[in-house]
């Protein structure tokens, strides 16, 4: 219910649309009821031409006679007063009948039989026309509201994705998050589209029909309500099961989306290892499991409507039997009004049935909404992106003071790391896989924050500065290059405003990328595809370096930028990196130790600790782990 209330609150910006829609819903319901009441004058025009008004007859029969005498022991004044009070209380219902009957008699049932019939047909036509116009306008207004709310929800979810810390993405699969932003949002649309419309329109219709039924015969209306709790019990029980199954269904859909995404991105590896059959079986098994959940959901969903309808039919048939027998004996009401009463009762079946279905739709939509709000309720990277001190000018001094960090409790990744990089220095981080090099790099732009200790930029704790301003002062080039499905120009100029063609070309030349770009058919306007897959690995890396050169940051972070390249590409990229690092504070994660022989300082990490510090020559002379790694790489290179 909490998720549903949150969805309803999102309707507030569209209050005017909702109010107008409700007005048209009421008009729709009123005209629906009036169109049904036209059955009575229609029957009179055809079959009761020579008879007195049935309503008048029933009023005469229903009006109790005033007591002629006073019972023994009673007070004549008191009894007569009680009678008059009772008559006053009941008269408004009878007055409605009489007024309506007189209006119909005066406006529709005058003149010849043909004229009467023509007037009744025209009245029915106008009522249905008004009803359909009101229904159409109401549907259009609520469709707008429903789609607008889903648009707002989708936008809010995307904006939330951009504010969440990287640790959130370590806990969730990409396919799962994509499923929440697409499939879950579409399912949740039921709660603010069709479901909200039905929740308003159907009760209005039921109340209208109920009011007419009560006016015609309150006794028979009470009989009709006897079995209603049974219908509601069935609806509620099925709805609870549907919500549980729907939640499982959304989880299976997320799993399937993740597998599909992994297959598309990893198809080269799948084919290289001849794992097509394995991946096919995996996907088909997940698809079958999703099919089972969806079928079970729809099995219950489809069951509730006929069950509700059948229970309503039972009520209607009981009324038909009981009321019909009374009509035969001349009691309860006139035949034409009994027909109207039955039509009204049976007309209530559709909105009651619809309300049964809407409960199921809400339960299904709420399971999806729960998953969406679980993301929206996640703590953002910073409470206020504008908070913190804005670093207008960054010199480039980076310092780690006794930094401890862990992704999971009890599993430390960094343990008491302390190091300093002065402005303009180039230092390298070296170590085996899992030693904490990449984590150390992530702490500098505030992608993660240490559990203990501090990371300082120009003496300012990263936790206390404006992260947007901090990150604009940094350039990051990683082994896994992130490019976008856009032109080469826009990828190089990413994050910068008012960049000229000359500036982009200058950055590309410095990155050894200009020559291959100009050989492409569209040059800098070439769209490079999803993740830049139309380019080779070396070309993608040079585009990434050009982007960092154009940004001209005082601090540069290089995460094994050449480790996945062939020799020729590595030489071109390394030459571009040499240009890039000039006069900048640079921290390099080195995979090939031959590329860092000229850096100012090397930090050797093992199991999250700094175990050696020095220049390349100093570390070779000192022996230890660094010399062992260098010797291994040198021997492997010689054998190769």
Image (cartoon, helix red, strand yellow):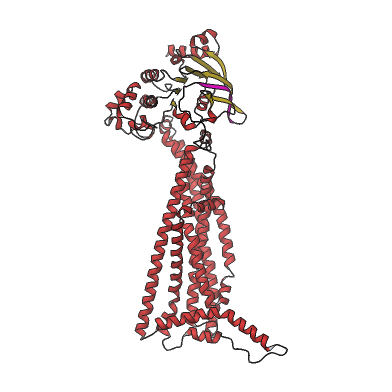
**Relative to 638, does residue 413 appear above or below in the rendering?**
below
Determine which quarter of the picture holds residue 493: top left
**Relative to 346, does residue 241 appear above or below in the rendering?**
above
Pick whichever, 529 or 617, lies toward us. Answer: 617
The magenta stretch is 389-410
Q: Position of residue 41 (x, y in %)?
A: 43, 80
Pick whichever, 192 or 630, lies toward us. Answer: 192
Task: Describe residue 267's horizontal placement relative to residue 240 as left or right.
Answer: left
Q: Position of residue 257 (x, y in %)?
A: 46, 41
How many marks on residues?
Answer: 0
**Relative to 587, does residue 207 appear above or below in the rendering?**
below
Determine which quarter of the picture holds residue 66: bottom right
Q: Is residue 393 magenta?
A: yes
Pick whichever, 225 or 84, lies toward us. Answer: 84
Which residue is the extreme one toward the top? Answer: 621
Residue lying at 50% horizontally and 11% vertically, measured from the top left: 615
**Quarter of the C terminus within the rendering:** top left
Q: Position of residue 296 (x, y in %)?
A: 52, 52
Which residue is the extreme one toward the bottom? Answer: 68
Residue 27 shows up from this direction: yes
Determine which quarter of the picture holds residue 512: top left
Residue lying at 50% horizontally and 80% vertically, measured from the top left: 97
Residue 285 shows up from this direction: no
Pick whichever, 164 or 453, lies toward us. Answer: 453
Q: Is residue 337 magenta?
A: no
Q: Position of residue 249 (x, y in %)?
A: 51, 48
């Amino acid at each position: 219910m909490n998720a549903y209330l949150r969805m309803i609150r999102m309707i507030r910006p569209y209050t005017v649309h909702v109010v107008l829609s409700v007005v048209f819903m009421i008009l729709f319901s009123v005209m629906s009821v009036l169109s049904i009441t036209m059955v009575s004058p229609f029957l009179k025009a055809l079959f009761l031409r020579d008879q007195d008004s049935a309503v008048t007859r029933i009023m005469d029969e229903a009006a109790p006679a005033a007591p002629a005498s006073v019972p023994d022991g009673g007070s004549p004044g008191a009894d007569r007063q009680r009678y008059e009070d009772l008559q006053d209380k009941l008269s408004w219902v009878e007055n409605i009948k009489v007024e309506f009957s007189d209006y119909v008699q005066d406006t529709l049932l005058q003149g010849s039989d043909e004229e009467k019939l023509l007037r009744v047909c025209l009245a029915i036509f106008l009522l249905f026309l008004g009803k359909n116009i009101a229904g159409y306008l109401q549907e259009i207004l609520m469709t707008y509201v429903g789609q607008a709310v889903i648009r707002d929800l989708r936008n809010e979810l995307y904006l939330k994705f951009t504010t969440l810390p990287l640790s959130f993405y370590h806990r969730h699969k990409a396919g799962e998050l994509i499923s929440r932003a697409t499939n879950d949002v579409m399912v949740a649309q039921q709660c603010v589209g069709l479901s909200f419309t039905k929740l308003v329109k159907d009760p209005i219709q039921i109340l209208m029909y109920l009011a007419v039924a009560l006016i015609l015969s309150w006794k028979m209306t009470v009989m009709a309500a006897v079995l209603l709790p049974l219908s509601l019990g069935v609806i509620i029980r099925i709805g609870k099961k549907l919500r549980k199954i729907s939640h499982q269904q959304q989880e299976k859909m997320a799993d399937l989306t993740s597998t599909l995404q992994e297959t598309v991105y990893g198809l080269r590896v799948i084919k290289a290892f001849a794992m097509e059959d394995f991946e096919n079986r995996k996907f088909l098994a997940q698809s079958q499991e999703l099919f089972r959940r969806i079928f079970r959901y729809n099995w219950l969903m489809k069951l509730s409507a006929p069950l509700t309808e059948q229970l309503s039919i039972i009520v209607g048939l009981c009324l038909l039997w009981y009321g019909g027998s009374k009509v035969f004996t001349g009691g309860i009401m006139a035949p034409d009004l009994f027909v109207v009463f039955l039509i009204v009762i049976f007309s209530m079946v559709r909105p009651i049935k619809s309300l049964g279905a809407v409960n199921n739709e809400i339960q299904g939509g709420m399971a999806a909404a729960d998953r969406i709000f679980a993301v929206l309720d996640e703590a953002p990277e910073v409470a206020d992106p504008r908070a913190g001190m804005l670093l207008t000018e960054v010199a480039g001094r980076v310092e780690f003071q006794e930094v401890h960090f862990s992704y999971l409790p009890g599993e430390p990744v960094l343990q008491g790391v302390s190091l300093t990089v002065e402005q303009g220095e180039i230092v390298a981080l070296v170590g085996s896989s899992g030693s904490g090099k990449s984590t150390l790099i992530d702490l500098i732009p505030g992608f993660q924050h240490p559990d203990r200790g501090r990371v300082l930029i120009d003496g300012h704790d990263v936790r206390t500065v404006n992260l947007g301003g901090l990150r604009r002062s940094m350039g990051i080039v990683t082994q896994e290059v992130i490019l976008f499905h856009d032109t080469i120009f826009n990828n190089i100029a990413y994050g910068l405003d008012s960049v000229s063609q000359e500036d982009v070309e200058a950055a590309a030349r410095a990155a050894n990328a200009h020559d291959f770009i100009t050989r492409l058919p569209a040059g800098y306007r070439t769209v490079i595809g999803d993740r830049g897959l139309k380019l080779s690995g070396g070309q993608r890396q040079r585009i990434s370096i050009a982007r960092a050169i154009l940004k001209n940051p005082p601090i540069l972070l290089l995460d094994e930028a050449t480790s996945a390249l062939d020799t020729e590409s590595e030489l071109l990229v390394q030459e571009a990196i040499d240009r890039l690092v000039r006069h900048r504070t640079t921290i390099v994660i080195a995979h090939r130790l031959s590329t860092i022989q000229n850096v100012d300082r090397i930090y050797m990490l093992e199991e999250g600790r700094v175990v050696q510090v020095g220049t390349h020559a100093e570390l070779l002379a000192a022996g230890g782990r660094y010399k062992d790694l260098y010797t291994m790489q040198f021997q492997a290179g010689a054998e190769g």
